[in-house]
Image: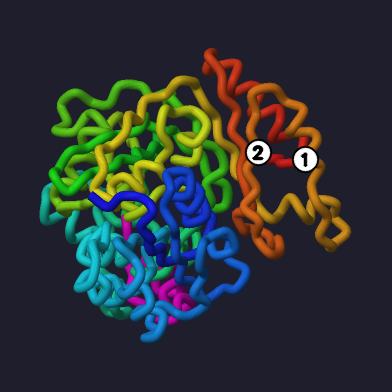
Amino acid sequence: MILPPATLGMLGGGQLGRFFVMAAHEMGYRVMVLDPDPHSPAGRIADEHLVAGYHDSHAVVRMEQECAAVTTEFENVPADTLAHLAKAAPVRPSSTAVAICQNRIVEKNFLRQHRLPHAPYAEIYALTDLEKTPQVLFPGILKVARFGYDGKGQVRVANRDEALTAFRHLNGEPCVLEQMLALDYEVSVVLARDQHGQVKCFPVAENTHRHGILDVSVVPARMGPCSEDRIYPNPQELAETVAREMDYVGVLAVEFFVSRGAIYVNEMAPRPHNSGHYTIDACVISQYEQQVRALCGLPLGDGKMHSAAVMVNLLGDLWFANGAGESREPEWNKLLAVPNLRLHLYGKHHARPGRKMGHFTVIGSDPVEVQRTALAARAAIGIVD
């Protein structure tokens, strides 16, 4: 076990890293953040912020020398940097697990190899691959294999001609063409798994998105029963299987589609997840403290809820809601006046449309009332559908 006041390393300086730093500090650890942005939310509150790229040799050596263990807050950190750091200290999750999650082609092939339910897909490397794809994949979604998130690098295509055009617009980057499922709803599971294989799952969240970006998470999910004739009727059970097959250590988020009562893995994130923000306010332990515990080899905590919760994302669009084209701080007093609402702002240097700037969570004993309150608060500050 790695105990306080050891220094922990974090690759990435966004809001997920910021919450990790806060959890680690509360537990008595020091944190060194590596992120090239001098204004990164995590770097601003870390004990030390290495303002450098993820391949910077001097920064990597500093982490090797000073960090007792290293983790990451986003999947696009170079896997080879993680592998290099693992020679000096525990790195959790492993570079192997991160490499699976950061490439959609590798991820889909992993699901197929382990017979985990997923939407039908094809690997696309060239226009000729699209010309011979089965017709059953249309309508579909063409997704770049690397660096696509929050709806970026994804195009809905109704037929082969649209797919060919979209592939050209994506500059011929390797892609997956995924059959578009008829969705009942979308859910996610955040879990922690330790080096001994013990797993603790947080409750299932039901998620809605706007323009490809998570908008609202409702917990507990208002799920109807999944088909009992399926091997995995339970999202938590399926998420645990994904983690076990990757020999995963750390916090993992698994997103699912539920279509006609059947459940399919959409994608995995080798880190805490936006849909798990509710754990800060509604659970005995947050996903970020679990991340610290799994990284340091400590016993995992209890992820059960003490309150129902609804989490609402706050995007940079809010700062421009006045229609004048200039940034203006939203009226936070309208949120702070709501009982049982907690506001979390990430301290990002400037707002821009589509950028995740913060979130708020409403908690309470009555799930229906919690949802009503959260949606009313969302509307009060100008978030409209």
Quadrant of residue 349 within the rendered picture? bottom right
Looking at this view, name the residue that lies furthest to the bottom.
57
Which segment is the magenta one?
160-178
Which disc, if any, is residue 322?
none
Given residues 358 and 298, the one toward you in this image is 298
Number of residue marks = 2
Q: In the image, is 83 to the left or to the right of 260?
A: left
Which amino acid is tagged 1? Trp
Taking the magenta stretch, the answer to whether it contains residue 65 is no
Quadrant of residue 215 within the rendered picture? top right
Which residue was labeled with disc 1? 332
| Rendering coords of residue 34 (x, y %) | 45, 71
- Tag 2–tag 1 contact (CB < 8 Å): yes
Q: In the image, is 339 to the left or to the right of 105?
A: right
CA–CA distance in space, label 2 to label 1? 8 Å
| Rendering coords of residue 102 (x, y %) | 32, 65
Could you say whether the residue bearing mark 2 is in a helix, strand or loop? strand
Q: Residue at x 54, y 65 (%)?
A: 43
Q: Residue at x 17, y 31 (%)?
A: 230
Given residues 122 and 198, the one toward you in this image is 198
Residue 176's place in the image compared with 183, above or below, is: below
Could you say whether the residue bearing mark 1 is in a helix, strand or loop? loop
Which residue was labeled with disc 2? 343
Which amino acid is tagged 2? Leu
Looking at this view, name the residue that lies furthest to the top.
366
Q: Residue at x 13, y 50 (%)?
A: 245
Res 135 visible: yes
Residue 26's place in the image compared with 346, above or below, is: above
